[in-house]
Image (cartoon, helix red, strand yellow):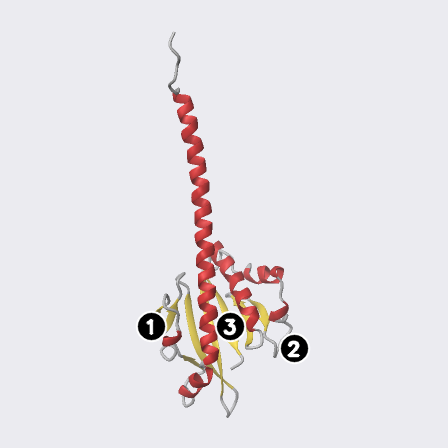
Amino acid sequence: MENQTGRSMIEMLGVLAIVGILSIGGISAFQKAMTKHKINQTTEEFSQFINDILGYSAQIKRLHKNDETAQLINISSSIEFLKPIKWIKRGPYFYDSMGNRINPFLRNDGGDVKIKKFALDYEMKIGKDNIELCMAMFNMAKPYYEELSGISVWTKTESVGASGSRTCGTDGRKCLSDVTLTDIKKFCDTCTSKKEVCTLAIGFNL
């Protein structure tokens, strides 16, 4: 009687099932790694963008010193040369490598003497990945707590966040330098799937 060296159909189906499960696991791990890479890339680009804005802040304000016609002055055209290479400008806005919209503007504050304050509105499409991005953005901003007036999560119904060094403790908000991962998770969890957009408002002491 000859030895049976072939595989039965049941064995082959079992092997295919195992391969399929492993493939799904591999794809999931790859997708998570790619998301992590995109988030890291975006926060690195944003950090460089902030550094460049800080370096050119005096020139930016001088360029718009006579612009008193609006409370909010979009300055994307003035600082387009500072945007990271992978960002694109569309109309008055920048869009980062994850497709999120950045609105850079000067705000006229004060009475007769106008004080121009620089700010960014970073609008994220809601989803699990952007909750992680939101948390990464807070961590990215922490080293700038001296230069920032604060960073907040804005939705249609509330605003939560932390303040920079000049106002922390006086406005009822925690200092940006002292926020924990638990605090940041709580801030970013206000961006729920029920809302169409969630905005990170980043203000500067400029």
Q: Secondary structure at mark 3?
A: strand
* Residue 202 tag number: 3
Residue under pointer 1 = 91
| Residues at marks 3 and 2 touching, judged by CB atoms closer than 8 Å | no
In the picture, measured across the screen, residue 142 lies left or right of residue 45, that is right
- Residue 86 % position (x, y): 37, 65
**How many angstroms separate mark 1 from mark 2 (CA)?**
37 Å
User: Outermost residue toward the front?
Assistant: 2
User: Outermost residue toward the top?
Assistant: 1
Residue under pointer 2 = 170
Q: Is residue 68 visible?
A: no
Which badge, 3 or 2, comes first in the chain's sequence?
A: 2
Q: Quadrant of the N terminus?
A: top left
- Residue 125 % position (x, y): 44, 60
Which badge, 1 or 3, comes first in the chain's sequence?
A: 1
Q: Secondary structure at mark 1?
A: loop
Q: Nearer the viewer, residue 140 or 104?
A: 140
Instruction: Say which amino acid is labelled 2.
Output: Thr
